Amino acid sequence: MTKILLIEDDLEMQMLISDYLANYDFKVVAFEKPKEALEHLGKNSDLYALVVLDLMLPQMDGFDVCKKIRELSSLPIIISSARGELSDKILGFDLGADDYLAKPYEPRELVIRINAILRRSINSAKTIGDFEIDENKHEMKVDGYLVDLTRIEYDILHLFLQNKDKVLSRESISNSVVGVEYNSKDRTIDMHISNIRQKIGDDSKEPKYIKSVWGVGYRFIG
């Protein structure tokens, strides 16, 4: 039976989710207090397939919990929260969440999201040139070494790898990556790409991987 770690301080919601997921052969281990959940996860992450995380928690802000989970484990995270603003969703994804469900929602939708994420975990690793991509874990390796990327950096680099040798404008990058907004006067995308270059050992003057296309955007050439 697939085990799900649930961090939710609403005991009624805990019971609802646990009972409903049990109907689909998921065993839920629930925690009300995030510090206890993190301590448990640090010792038992290999027992779980996925984490469902509320944001409105005692002891810690849910976004901080999300960040801590990502430091401890590569387990997929589904945020389940009444905080449904776009800014909250963007921050959640940037901190490493794999999905975001705004309450209230039908429990069946949670099952669908869980199954979709778990399906992606099957044969999720693939190699493109020097890069090994694990789409389930949102991890990237270069020449066998794990690269410490933020969610947005991962998504941008993944976009480049999927569009090798194609010129991508800043606007097209913005349209394809959650959490990146395009403004012709804003250098946010350039800053993300600069960070990616540093982390993968790419020289902007003599690029091996990401080439700047003056006046347009970037092209992945590696």
Image (tube, helix red, strand yellow):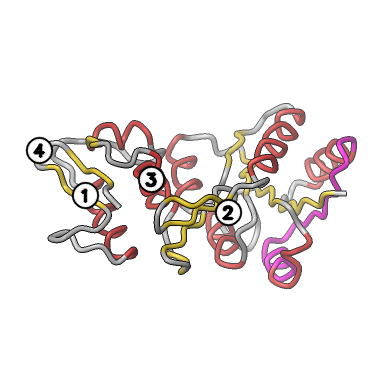
Q: Measure the C-alpha gap from mark 1 to mark 3.
A: 17 Å
Q: Earlier in the sequence, mark 4 or mark 2?
A: 2
Look at the numbered disc 3 and give the secondary structure of its residue: helix
Horizontally, is 6 left or right of 220 in the view? right
What range of the chain is rendered magenta?
23-41
Numbered badge on residue 215 = 4
Q: Residues within 10 Å of mark 1 (few under 14, many from 20)?
A: some
Q: Nearer the viewer, mark 4 or mark 3?
A: 3
Q: Which residue is mark 1?
A: 190
Q: Residue at x 82, y 55 (%)?
A: 29
Q: Nearer the viewer, mark 1 or mark 2?
A: 2
Q: Measure the C-alpha gap from mark 4 to mark 1.
A: 12 Å
Q: Nearer the viewer, mark 1 or mark 3?
A: 3
Quarter holding residue 204: bottom left
Circle 3: residue type: Leu
Q: Nearer the viewer, residue 66 or 61?
A: 66
Q: Earlier in the sequence, mark 4 or mark 3?
A: 3
Quarter holding residue 184: top left
Q: Residue at x 58, y 39 (%)?
A: 100
Quarter holding residue 47: bottom right
Q: Nearer the viewer, residue 82 or 76?
A: 76
Circle 1: residue type: Asp
Q: Nearer the viewer, residue 29 or 16?
A: 29
